[in-house]
Amino acid sequence: MAGGIAFFFAFVLVWWAYGSIVDAGKALDGDVIEAYVWGREFRLGYNQHPPLWAWISGAWFLVFPNREWAFHLLAVVNSGIGLLGCWRLIGLFATGWKRLASFVLLLLTPFYTFLCYKYNANSIFLSIWPWTLYFAVASLNTRSRWNAVWFGVLLAAGMLSKYYAITLALTCLAASLVHPDRRAYYRSASPYISVGLCVLLALPHVFWLLTSDAPPVAYILARTGGGMLRALRYGGELLGAIVLMHVAVILVVLAAAYPSLRFDRTRLSRERLLLVLVVTPIALTILFGLVFELEVSSNMMIGTFPLVPLLLIRAFPPAEPWRVARVAIVGAAGTAAVVLIASPAIAYVAFRSSDPAAAEPRQELAEYATRLWHEQTGTKLRIVTGTDPYENAIGFYSADKPKVFIGFSQWKAPWITPDALARDGLLVVCLREYAFCPVQAAPFLSPETKRFTVSLSHEFWGHRRAPMEFNLLLVPPKANPRS
Protein backbone atom coordinates (compact mmCIF):
# COMPACT_ATOMS: atom_id res chain seq x y z
CA MET A 1 0.00 0.00 0.00
CA ALA A 2 2.74 2.46 0.99
CA GLY A 3 4.64 1.67 -2.20
CA GLY A 4 1.55 2.34 -4.31
CA ILE A 5 0.93 5.70 -2.61
CA ALA A 6 4.57 6.69 -3.05
CA PHE A 7 4.48 5.75 -6.73
CA PHE A 8 1.25 7.70 -7.24
CA PHE A 9 2.61 10.92 -5.76
CA ALA A 10 5.96 10.58 -7.53
CA PHE A 11 4.25 9.93 -10.86
CA VAL A 12 1.88 12.88 -10.42
CA LEU A 13 4.67 15.24 -9.35
CA VAL A 14 7.02 14.38 -12.24
CA TRP A 15 4.49 14.36 -15.03
CA TRP A 16 2.59 17.37 -13.72
CA ALA A 17 5.84 19.32 -13.70
CA TYR A 18 6.66 18.15 -17.22
CA GLY A 19 3.24 19.04 -18.61
CA SER A 20 3.15 22.44 -16.93
CA ILE A 21 6.57 23.40 -18.29
CA VAL A 22 6.11 22.02 -21.81
CA ASP A 23 2.75 23.73 -22.29
CA ALA A 24 3.80 27.01 -20.69
CA GLY A 25 3.88 28.76 -24.07
CA LYS A 26 0.55 27.34 -25.27
CA ALA A 27 -3.08 27.89 -24.48
CA LEU A 28 -5.10 24.92 -23.30
CA ASP A 29 -6.60 22.68 -25.96
CA GLY A 30 -10.18 23.46 -26.96
CA ASP A 31 -11.50 20.13 -25.63
CA VAL A 32 -9.89 20.80 -22.26
CA ILE A 33 -11.39 24.27 -21.86
CA GLU A 34 -14.72 22.83 -22.99
CA ALA A 35 -14.63 20.56 -19.93
CA TYR A 36 -14.23 23.67 -17.76
CA VAL A 37 -17.01 25.60 -19.52
CA TRP A 38 -19.49 22.72 -19.33
CA GLY A 39 -18.42 21.73 -15.84
CA ARG A 40 -19.40 25.08 -14.42
CA GLU A 41 -22.99 24.14 -15.20
CA PHE A 42 -23.89 20.89 -13.45
CA ARG A 43 -26.35 19.57 -16.03
CA LEU A 44 -27.57 16.01 -16.60
CA GLY A 45 -26.10 16.18 -20.10
CA TYR A 46 -24.50 18.50 -22.61
CA ASN A 47 -24.83 19.12 -26.30
CA GLN A 48 -22.17 16.53 -27.28
CA HIS A 49 -21.58 14.12 -24.41
CA PRO A 50 -22.91 12.78 -21.12
CA PRO A 51 -21.91 14.84 -18.09
CA LEU A 52 -19.60 12.99 -15.68
CA TRP A 53 -16.19 14.05 -17.00
CA ALA A 54 -17.38 17.68 -17.08
CA TRP A 55 -18.80 17.34 -13.56
CA ILE A 56 -15.37 16.20 -12.38
CA SER A 57 -13.83 19.28 -13.97
CA GLY A 58 -16.48 21.49 -12.41
CA ALA A 59 -15.91 20.03 -8.95
CA TRP A 60 -12.13 20.31 -9.39
CA PHE A 61 -12.33 24.03 -10.15
CA LEU A 62 -14.52 24.68 -7.16
CA VAL A 63 -11.33 23.94 -5.23
CA PHE A 64 -8.54 24.97 -7.64
CA PRO A 65 -8.10 28.28 -9.49
CA ASN A 66 -8.79 28.45 -13.25
CA ARG A 67 -5.14 28.15 -14.18
CA GLU A 68 -3.39 25.91 -16.68
CA TRP A 69 -1.31 24.19 -14.01
CA ALA A 70 -4.51 23.12 -12.23
CA PHE A 71 -5.82 21.49 -15.41
CA HIS A 72 -2.53 19.68 -15.92
CA LEU A 73 -2.75 18.44 -12.34
CA LEU A 74 -6.28 17.14 -12.91
CA ALA A 75 -5.17 15.31 -16.05
CA VAL A 76 -2.18 13.65 -14.37
CA VAL A 77 -4.16 12.71 -11.26
CA ASN A 78 -6.72 11.06 -13.56
CA SER A 79 -3.89 9.13 -15.22
CA GLY A 80 -2.32 8.19 -11.89
CA ILE A 81 -5.62 6.83 -10.56
CA GLY A 82 -5.87 4.78 -13.74
CA LEU A 83 -2.41 3.33 -13.20
CA LEU A 84 -3.37 2.25 -9.69
CA GLY A 85 -6.34 0.49 -11.27
CA CYS A 86 -4.02 -1.17 -13.79
CA TRP A 87 -1.85 -2.51 -10.96
CA ARG A 88 -4.88 -4.01 -9.24
CA LEU A 89 -6.26 -5.41 -12.51
CA ILE A 90 -2.97 -7.01 -13.55
CA GLY A 91 -2.76 -8.52 -10.06
CA LEU A 92 -5.81 -10.64 -10.85
CA PHE A 93 -3.82 -12.38 -13.60
CA ALA A 94 -0.18 -12.29 -12.46
CA THR A 95 2.06 -11.95 -9.43
CA GLY A 96 5.68 -11.14 -8.67
CA TRP A 97 7.99 -10.10 -11.49
CA LYS A 98 5.38 -10.78 -14.16
CA ARG A 99 2.95 -8.38 -12.52
CA LEU A 100 5.62 -5.72 -12.07
CA ALA A 101 6.89 -6.10 -15.63
CA SER A 102 3.40 -5.87 -17.11
CA PHE A 103 2.68 -2.75 -15.09
CA VAL A 104 5.91 -0.86 -15.74
CA LEU A 105 5.65 -1.59 -19.46
CA LEU A 106 2.52 0.58 -19.45
CA LEU A 107 4.80 3.54 -18.69
CA LEU A 108 6.59 2.88 -21.98
CA THR A 109 3.36 3.65 -23.83
CA PRO A 110 2.31 7.30 -24.30
CA PHE A 111 -1.23 6.83 -22.98
CA TYR A 112 -0.61 7.57 -19.30
CA THR A 113 2.07 10.22 -19.83
CA PHE A 114 2.40 12.24 -23.03
CA LEU A 115 -1.22 11.80 -24.12
CA CYS A 116 -2.92 12.23 -20.76
CA TYR A 117 -2.93 16.05 -20.69
CA LYS A 118 -5.88 16.48 -23.05
CA TYR A 119 -8.52 16.00 -20.37
CA ASN A 120 -11.76 15.22 -22.16
CA ALA A 121 -14.44 12.56 -22.65
CA ASN A 122 -11.78 10.16 -23.98
CA SER A 123 -9.01 10.54 -21.41
CA ILE A 124 -11.39 10.02 -18.49
CA PHE A 125 -11.29 6.34 -19.47
CA LEU A 126 -7.65 6.21 -18.37
CA SER A 127 -9.07 5.92 -14.86
CA ILE A 128 -12.52 4.42 -15.46
CA TRP A 129 -11.56 1.54 -17.79
CA PRO A 130 -8.99 -0.38 -15.67
CA TRP A 131 -10.97 -0.01 -12.45
CA THR A 132 -14.16 -1.19 -14.17
CA LEU A 133 -12.35 -4.24 -15.56
CA TYR A 134 -10.84 -4.90 -12.14
CA PHE A 135 -14.19 -5.03 -10.37
CA ALA A 136 -15.77 -6.92 -13.28
CA VAL A 137 -13.15 -9.70 -13.13
CA ALA A 138 -13.11 -9.65 -9.31
CA SER A 139 -16.89 -10.04 -9.33
CA LEU A 140 -16.60 -12.95 -11.77
CA ASN A 141 -13.97 -14.61 -9.58
CA THR A 142 -15.64 -14.18 -6.20
CA ARG A 143 -19.32 -13.29 -6.82
CA SER A 144 -18.78 -10.75 -4.03
CA ARG A 145 -21.62 -8.27 -3.72
CA TRP A 146 -19.14 -5.54 -2.82
CA ASN A 147 -17.31 -6.09 -6.11
CA ALA A 148 -20.64 -6.25 -7.93
CA VAL A 149 -21.67 -2.88 -6.50
CA TRP A 150 -18.43 -1.20 -7.57
CA PHE A 151 -18.63 -2.81 -10.99
CA GLY A 152 -22.11 -1.34 -11.48
CA VAL A 153 -21.03 2.09 -10.22
CA LEU A 154 -17.99 2.26 -12.49
CA LEU A 155 -19.86 0.94 -15.51
CA ALA A 156 -22.40 3.72 -14.96
CA ALA A 157 -19.51 6.20 -14.64
CA GLY A 158 -18.29 5.11 -18.06
CA MET A 159 -21.73 5.42 -19.63
CA LEU A 160 -22.16 8.85 -18.04
CA SER A 161 -18.85 10.00 -19.52
CA LYS A 162 -19.14 8.92 -23.16
CA TYR A 163 -21.34 6.47 -25.00
CA TYR A 164 -18.17 4.72 -26.17
CA ALA A 165 -18.55 2.94 -22.82
CA ILE A 166 -20.95 0.62 -24.63
CA THR A 167 -17.72 -1.02 -25.81
CA LEU A 168 -16.63 -1.39 -22.18
CA ALA A 169 -19.95 -2.98 -21.24
CA LEU A 170 -19.80 -5.43 -24.16
CA THR A 171 -16.20 -6.30 -23.30
CA CYS A 172 -17.23 -7.17 -19.75
CA LEU A 173 -20.16 -9.21 -21.09
CA ALA A 174 -17.85 -11.13 -23.44
CA ALA A 175 -15.44 -11.75 -20.56
CA SER A 176 -18.25 -13.17 -18.43
CA LEU A 177 -19.16 -15.63 -21.20
CA VAL A 178 -15.66 -17.14 -21.36
CA HIS A 179 -14.94 -17.11 -17.62
CA PRO A 180 -14.56 -20.61 -16.11
CA ASP A 181 -17.08 -19.78 -13.36
CA ARG A 182 -19.66 -18.17 -15.63
CA ARG A 183 -22.45 -20.53 -14.58
CA ALA A 184 -21.94 -19.83 -10.90
CA TYR A 185 -21.68 -16.12 -11.64
CA TYR A 186 -24.99 -15.90 -13.47
CA ARG A 187 -26.68 -17.99 -10.78
CA SER A 188 -25.53 -15.52 -8.14
CA ALA A 189 -26.94 -12.06 -7.40
CA SER A 190 -23.77 -10.29 -8.58
CA PRO A 191 -24.54 -9.61 -12.27
CA TYR A 192 -28.05 -8.39 -11.45
CA ILE A 193 -26.77 -6.07 -8.72
CA SER A 194 -24.26 -4.60 -11.16
CA VAL A 195 -26.73 -4.13 -14.02
CA GLY A 196 -29.47 -2.81 -11.74
CA LEU A 197 -27.19 -0.27 -10.10
CA CYS A 198 -25.77 0.84 -13.45
CA VAL A 199 -29.26 1.39 -14.86
CA LEU A 200 -30.39 3.20 -11.72
CA LEU A 201 -27.46 5.62 -11.81
CA ALA A 202 -27.91 6.27 -15.53
CA LEU A 203 -31.68 6.90 -15.31
CA PRO A 204 -31.47 10.67 -14.63
CA HIS A 205 -29.36 11.13 -17.74
CA VAL A 206 -31.75 8.95 -19.76
CA PHE A 207 -34.65 11.09 -18.53
CA TRP A 208 -32.74 14.19 -19.62
CA LEU A 209 -32.19 12.65 -23.06
CA LEU A 210 -35.89 11.95 -23.46
CA THR A 211 -36.92 15.45 -22.41
CA SER A 212 -34.28 17.51 -24.21
CA ASP A 213 -34.26 16.08 -27.77
CA ALA A 214 -31.12 14.03 -26.95
CA PRO A 215 -28.37 16.45 -28.11
CA PRO A 216 -25.52 13.91 -27.67
CA VAL A 217 -27.36 11.39 -29.82
CA ALA A 218 -27.92 14.01 -32.52
CA TYR A 219 -24.21 14.86 -32.32
CA ILE A 220 -23.23 11.22 -32.83
CA LEU A 221 -25.68 10.70 -35.69
CA ALA A 222 -24.30 13.77 -37.43
CA ARG A 223 -20.88 12.10 -37.47
CA THR A 224 -22.08 8.85 -39.06
CA GLY A 225 -22.31 8.09 -42.76
CA GLY A 226 -18.83 9.23 -43.69
CA GLY A 227 -18.48 6.48 -46.30
CA MET A 228 -17.24 2.91 -46.14
CA LEU A 229 -13.86 3.67 -47.73
CA ARG A 230 -13.15 6.35 -45.16
CA ALA A 231 -14.28 4.02 -42.38
CA LEU A 232 -11.93 1.31 -43.67
CA ARG A 233 -9.08 3.79 -43.81
CA TYR A 234 -9.71 4.96 -40.27
CA GLY A 235 -9.90 1.36 -39.06
CA GLY A 236 -6.56 0.57 -40.68
CA GLU A 237 -4.99 3.72 -39.26
CA LEU A 238 -6.30 2.77 -35.83
CA LEU A 239 -4.61 -0.63 -35.96
CA GLY A 240 -1.38 0.99 -37.10
CA ALA A 241 -1.56 3.56 -34.30
CA ILE A 242 -2.14 0.84 -31.69
CA VAL A 243 0.97 -1.03 -32.84
CA LEU A 244 3.01 2.18 -33.04
CA MET A 245 2.06 3.25 -29.53
CA HIS A 246 3.08 -0.15 -28.17
CA VAL A 247 6.31 -0.34 -30.14
CA ALA A 248 8.52 0.19 -27.07
CA VAL A 249 6.63 -2.53 -25.20
CA ILE A 250 6.96 -4.92 -28.13
CA LEU A 251 10.69 -4.25 -28.51
CA VAL A 252 11.41 -4.77 -24.81
CA VAL A 253 9.50 -8.07 -24.72
CA LEU A 254 11.11 -9.35 -27.92
CA ALA A 255 14.57 -8.29 -26.74
CA ALA A 256 14.04 -10.11 -23.45
CA ALA A 257 12.93 -13.25 -25.35
CA TYR A 258 15.94 -13.19 -27.70
CA PRO A 259 17.72 -15.41 -28.80
CA SER A 260 15.17 -18.18 -28.04
CA LEU A 261 12.38 -16.14 -29.56
CA ARG A 262 9.24 -18.25 -29.57
CA PHE A 263 5.57 -17.34 -29.90
CA ASP A 264 3.48 -19.77 -27.82
CA ARG A 265 0.14 -19.88 -29.62
CA THR A 266 -1.05 -22.91 -27.65
CA ARG A 267 -0.43 -21.25 -24.31
CA LEU A 268 -1.99 -18.02 -25.48
CA SER A 269 -5.13 -19.83 -26.63
CA ARG A 270 -5.66 -20.91 -23.03
CA GLU A 271 -5.72 -17.26 -21.92
CA ARG A 272 -9.26 -16.79 -23.18
CA LEU A 273 -10.29 -14.25 -20.55
CA LEU A 274 -7.17 -12.15 -21.07
CA LEU A 275 -7.52 -12.32 -24.85
CA VAL A 276 -11.15 -11.23 -24.70
CA LEU A 277 -10.37 -8.25 -22.46
CA VAL A 278 -7.61 -7.07 -24.82
CA VAL A 279 -9.04 -7.85 -28.25
CA THR A 280 -12.77 -7.16 -27.80
CA PRO A 281 -12.60 -3.35 -27.49
CA ILE A 282 -10.33 -3.13 -30.54
CA ALA A 283 -12.58 -5.36 -32.63
CA LEU A 284 -15.75 -3.60 -31.50
CA THR A 285 -14.35 -0.13 -32.16
CA ILE A 286 -13.42 -1.05 -35.72
CA LEU A 287 -16.73 -2.88 -36.21
CA PHE A 288 -18.77 0.11 -35.02
CA GLY A 289 -16.69 2.35 -37.26
CA LEU A 290 -17.49 0.21 -40.29
CA VAL A 291 -21.18 -0.32 -39.50
CA PHE A 292 -21.90 3.34 -38.82
CA GLU A 293 -19.20 4.70 -41.15
CA LEU A 294 -17.60 6.59 -38.28
CA GLU A 295 -14.18 8.13 -37.85
CA VAL A 296 -12.44 6.00 -35.22
CA SER A 297 -9.04 6.81 -33.75
CA SER A 298 -6.64 5.84 -31.02
CA ASN A 299 -7.75 8.92 -29.06
CA MET A 300 -11.08 7.33 -28.25
CA MET A 301 -9.33 4.11 -27.13
CA ILE A 302 -6.72 5.80 -24.94
CA GLY A 303 -7.71 3.94 -21.77
CA THR A 304 -8.44 0.50 -23.18
CA PHE A 305 -4.99 -1.16 -23.18
CA PRO A 306 -4.04 -1.93 -19.55
CA LEU A 307 -3.57 -5.67 -20.20
CA VAL A 308 -1.68 -5.56 -23.52
CA PRO A 309 1.82 -5.85 -21.95
CA LEU A 310 0.75 -8.86 -19.89
CA LEU A 311 -0.69 -10.53 -22.98
CA LEU A 312 2.60 -9.98 -24.85
CA ILE A 313 4.63 -11.45 -21.99
CA ARG A 314 2.35 -14.47 -21.93
CA ALA A 315 2.66 -14.81 -25.71
CA PHE A 316 6.48 -15.00 -25.56
CA PRO A 317 7.41 -17.29 -22.65
CA PRO A 318 11.20 -16.93 -23.15
CA ALA A 319 10.85 -13.25 -22.16
CA GLU A 320 11.75 -13.66 -18.51
CA PRO A 321 9.63 -11.24 -16.45
CA TRP A 322 12.46 -10.12 -14.17
CA ARG A 323 14.52 -9.07 -17.19
CA VAL A 324 11.55 -7.30 -18.77
CA ALA A 325 10.79 -5.51 -15.50
CA ARG A 326 14.36 -4.24 -15.06
CA VAL A 327 14.61 -2.94 -18.60
CA ALA A 328 11.15 -1.35 -18.36
CA ILE A 329 11.97 0.36 -15.05
CA VAL A 330 15.17 1.82 -16.47
CA GLY A 331 13.35 2.87 -19.63
CA ALA A 332 10.41 4.49 -17.82
CA ALA A 333 12.58 6.26 -15.24
CA GLY A 334 15.07 7.35 -17.89
CA THR A 335 12.35 8.70 -20.15
CA ALA A 336 10.81 10.69 -17.30
CA ALA A 337 14.18 12.14 -16.29
CA VAL A 338 15.22 13.05 -19.83
CA VAL A 339 11.97 14.74 -20.82
CA LEU A 340 11.78 16.60 -17.51
CA ILE A 341 15.29 17.98 -18.01
CA ALA A 342 14.53 18.80 -21.64
CA SER A 343 11.09 20.29 -20.90
CA PRO A 344 12.13 23.97 -21.27
CA ALA A 345 13.59 23.26 -24.72
CA ILE A 346 10.51 21.22 -25.64
CA ALA A 347 8.33 24.14 -24.48
CA TYR A 348 10.19 26.51 -26.82
CA VAL A 349 9.82 24.12 -29.78
CA ALA A 350 6.12 23.70 -28.98
CA PHE A 351 5.66 27.47 -28.92
CA ARG A 352 7.26 27.79 -32.36
CA SER A 353 5.12 25.00 -33.82
CA SER A 354 2.07 25.37 -36.07
CA ASP A 355 -0.27 24.32 -33.26
CA PRO A 356 -3.04 26.96 -33.09
CA ALA A 357 -2.95 26.79 -29.29
CA ALA A 358 0.68 27.97 -29.47
CA ALA A 359 0.19 30.56 -32.20
CA GLU A 360 -3.03 32.26 -31.18
CA PRO A 361 -3.33 35.01 -28.53
CA ARG A 362 -6.12 33.35 -26.57
CA GLN A 363 -5.01 34.40 -23.11
CA GLU A 364 -4.11 37.88 -24.33
CA LEU A 365 -7.56 38.18 -25.89
CA ALA A 366 -9.22 37.20 -22.61
CA GLU A 367 -7.24 39.81 -20.68
CA TYR A 368 -7.90 42.55 -23.23
CA ALA A 369 -11.62 41.76 -23.58
CA THR A 370 -12.13 41.71 -19.81
CA ARG A 371 -10.35 45.03 -19.36
CA LEU A 372 -12.30 46.60 -22.23
CA TRP A 373 -15.61 45.39 -20.79
CA HIS A 374 -14.79 46.92 -17.40
CA GLU A 375 -13.86 50.24 -19.00
CA GLN A 376 -16.97 50.42 -21.18
CA THR A 377 -19.65 49.09 -18.82
CA GLY A 378 -18.30 49.41 -15.30
CA THR A 379 -19.49 45.87 -14.55
CA LYS A 380 -18.00 42.40 -14.41
CA LEU A 381 -17.97 40.36 -17.60
CA ARG A 382 -20.56 37.65 -17.07
CA ILE A 383 -21.50 36.21 -20.50
CA VAL A 384 -19.34 35.72 -23.59
CA THR A 385 -19.97 34.20 -27.00
CA GLY A 386 -18.49 34.24 -30.49
CA THR A 387 -16.04 32.31 -32.61
CA ASP A 388 -14.88 28.96 -31.27
CA PRO A 389 -12.46 28.46 -29.46
CA TYR A 390 -12.04 32.09 -28.42
CA GLU A 391 -15.34 32.25 -26.55
CA ASN A 392 -14.32 29.29 -24.39
CA ALA A 393 -10.80 30.71 -23.95
CA ILE A 394 -12.25 33.91 -22.51
CA GLY A 395 -14.54 31.81 -20.32
CA PHE A 396 -11.47 30.13 -18.81
CA TYR A 397 -8.75 32.79 -18.86
CA SER A 398 -10.81 35.83 -17.87
CA ALA A 399 -10.49 36.78 -14.21
CA ASP A 400 -14.25 37.41 -14.21
CA LYS A 401 -15.01 33.75 -15.07
CA PRO A 402 -17.87 34.57 -17.46
CA LYS A 403 -20.33 31.94 -18.58
CA VAL A 404 -20.14 30.93 -22.24
CA PHE A 405 -23.10 31.25 -24.59
CA ILE A 406 -21.88 28.37 -26.78
CA GLY A 407 -22.31 29.08 -30.49
CA PHE A 408 -25.05 31.68 -29.87
CA SER A 409 -27.29 28.68 -29.10
CA GLN A 410 -29.59 28.25 -26.13
CA TRP A 411 -29.90 24.60 -27.19
CA LYS A 412 -26.16 24.17 -26.61
CA ALA A 413 -26.06 26.52 -23.61
CA PRO A 414 -29.46 26.35 -21.87
CA TRP A 415 -27.97 28.14 -18.86
CA ILE A 416 -28.03 31.39 -20.88
CA THR A 417 -31.59 32.76 -20.86
CA PRO A 418 -33.00 35.96 -22.41
CA ASP A 419 -33.37 37.39 -18.89
CA ALA A 420 -29.70 36.66 -18.18
CA LEU A 421 -28.64 38.36 -21.42
CA ALA A 422 -30.71 41.45 -20.56
CA ARG A 423 -29.47 41.55 -16.98
CA ASP A 424 -25.77 40.83 -17.57
CA GLY A 425 -25.11 42.00 -21.12
CA LEU A 426 -23.08 40.09 -23.68
CA LEU A 427 -19.57 40.18 -25.11
CA VAL A 428 -19.25 38.84 -28.65
CA VAL A 429 -15.74 38.03 -29.86
CA CYS A 430 -15.28 37.33 -33.57
CA LEU A 431 -12.16 36.43 -35.48
CA ARG A 432 -12.22 39.25 -38.02
CA GLU A 433 -11.87 36.98 -41.05
CA TYR A 434 -14.98 34.97 -40.04
CA ALA A 435 -17.73 37.04 -41.63
CA PHE A 436 -20.53 34.77 -40.44
CA CYS A 437 -19.83 35.52 -36.75
CA PRO A 438 -21.36 39.06 -36.75
CA VAL A 439 -24.32 37.64 -38.67
CA GLN A 440 -24.90 35.07 -35.94
CA ALA A 441 -24.54 37.79 -33.32
CA ALA A 442 -27.08 40.14 -34.93
CA PRO A 443 -30.22 38.82 -33.12
CA PHE A 444 -28.54 39.46 -29.74
CA LEU A 445 -27.28 43.00 -30.38
CA SER A 446 -28.95 46.21 -29.22
CA PRO A 447 -28.79 49.89 -30.25
CA GLU A 448 -26.33 50.42 -27.39
CA THR A 449 -23.87 47.86 -28.80
CA LYS A 450 -20.29 49.12 -28.97
CA ARG A 451 -17.90 47.83 -31.61
CA PHE A 452 -14.13 47.52 -31.36
CA THR A 453 -11.35 45.99 -33.45
CA VAL A 454 -8.09 44.86 -31.91
CA SER A 455 -4.89 43.23 -33.17
CA LEU A 456 -3.19 40.93 -30.68
CA SER A 457 -0.14 38.65 -30.67
CA HIS A 458 0.84 35.73 -28.50
CA GLU A 459 4.20 36.19 -26.77
CA PHE A 460 6.42 33.73 -24.90
CA TRP A 461 9.94 34.21 -23.56
CA GLY A 462 10.29 37.45 -25.53
CA HIS A 463 9.25 35.91 -28.86
CA ARG A 464 6.10 37.08 -30.59
CA ARG A 465 3.86 35.17 -32.99
CA ALA A 466 2.02 36.68 -35.95
CA PRO A 467 -0.78 39.11 -34.93
CA MET A 468 -4.46 38.24 -35.28
CA GLU A 469 -7.37 40.65 -35.59
CA PHE A 470 -10.62 40.37 -33.66
CA ASN A 471 -13.91 42.23 -33.68
CA LEU A 472 -15.44 42.73 -30.25
CA LEU A 473 -19.11 43.62 -29.85
CA LEU A 474 -20.11 44.81 -26.39
CA VAL A 475 -23.82 44.61 -25.56
CA PRO A 476 -24.11 46.37 -22.17
CA PRO A 477 -26.60 45.32 -19.50
CA LYS A 478 -30.01 46.88 -20.07
CA ALA A 479 -30.90 47.72 -16.50
CA ASN A 480 -29.72 47.34 -12.94
CA PRO A 481 -26.14 46.35 -13.82
CA ARG A 482 -24.33 44.45 -11.12
CA SER A 483 -20.88 45.59 -10.19
Image (spheres, rainbow, N blue to C red):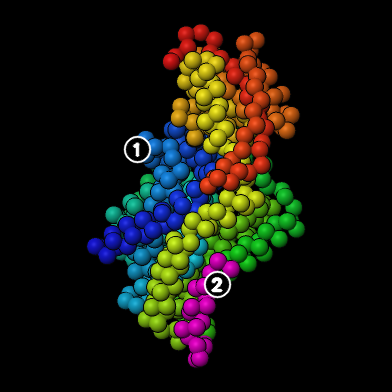
Which residue carries the number 2 mark? 247
Of residues 222 and 149, the one nearer the viewer is: 222
Report the amino acid beneath label 1: Val
Q: Secondary structure at mark 2?
A: helix
Residue drawn at x 52%, y 31% as measured from the top left:
367
Farthest residue to the left: give it. 2
Q: Is residue 460 magenta?
A: no
Q: Position of residue 83 (x, y in %)?
A: 39, 60
Find the magenta span and give its range: 244-262
Which residue carries the number 1 mark? 63
Residue drawn at x 54%, y 21% as measured from the top left:
373
Residue drawn at x 27%, y 65% as measured from the top left:
3
Q: Is residue 257 magenta?
A: yes
Characterize the local packing of mark 1: few (<14), some (14-19) or many (20 or more) Cα atoms within 10 angstroms: few
Q: The C terminus is located in which quarter?
A: top left
Of residues 422 and 14, the one nearer the viewer is: 14
Residue drawn at x 68%, y 47% as measured from the top left:
224
Q: The N terminus is located in which quarter?
A: bottom left
Report the amino acid beneath label 2: Val
